[in-house]
Image (tube, rainbow, N blue to C red):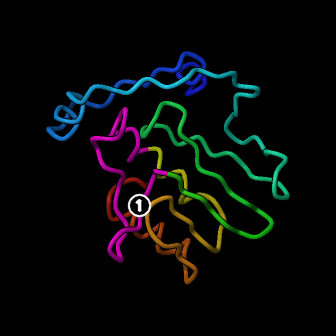
Amino acid sequence: ADAEFIRAGTLPSIDRSRTSGRLFARIPARPYAAFAVSEALTDGQVIDVAGGLRVAHTPGHTPGHISLLHESTGVLITGDSIFNMASRMTWALSAFCTSYEQSKNTAGRLGDLEFNVAAFTHGPEIRNKARERIRSFLTKRGALG
């Protein structure tokens, strides 16, 4: 879903439902060069890199946001679905999401995956009881049924 923005060199709209999003949306977006997308990734697809990375579609940060699971080593890369900042997990900042609520809801999918290590784009990895800790975070915040 992000491919259309990449091809056009544009950004998706920011979620303006919260004050931070409304303030951030006032900053003019800097243009960037459009470029070709050779392959659009799909949910469940295994990318032939590093021994295989399974795509988990977790939109909300952007329309096409994904998380990646390296099944053979049990490493989950959460992307911007969940942050691990200041020794605690938290959601992505709402000002940087196209849909903050969707981002929180789709992060719940991560709790259904099998992994041993959780890596974050923001914050240190979790190596000890990573799946249990992610599931606990998601459950406490109502994202895991």
| Side of 79 where 141 appears, left or right | left
Q: Is residue 99 magenta?
A: yes
10 shown above or below 20:
above
Picture quadrant where residue 61 is located: top left
How packed mark 1 is, by other alpha carbons closer than 10 Å (few <14, some 14-19, many 20 or more), is many
Assign a secondary structure to mark 1. strand
Number of numbered labels in the structure image: 1
Point out the image quarter for the N terminus: top right
* Residue 73 magenta: no
Q: Is 24 placed above or below 67 here?
A: above
In the image, the segment drawn in magenta is: 80-105
Q: Quadrant of residue 7?
A: top right
- On screen, 124 above or below 65? below
- Answer with left or right where residue 46 lies relative to residue 132: right
Q: Above or below — where is 120 with respect to 108?
A: below
Q: Position of residue 4 (x, y in %)?
A: 57, 19
Across and down, in percent, residue 24 comes to 23, 35
Q: Which residue, as the protein is rendered here, is positioned at the far top?
A: 8
- Report the residue at 35% width, 55% height from top: 91
Badge 1 amino acid: Phe
Residue 127 position within the rendered picture, expressed as x and y whole percent measured from the top left? 58, 80
Q: What residue would you read off at disc 1?
A: 83
Is 98 on the left or on the right of 95, as rendered? right
Which residue: 34% across, 26% down? 29
Query: Of residues 115 and 75, which is closer to you in this image?
Result: 75
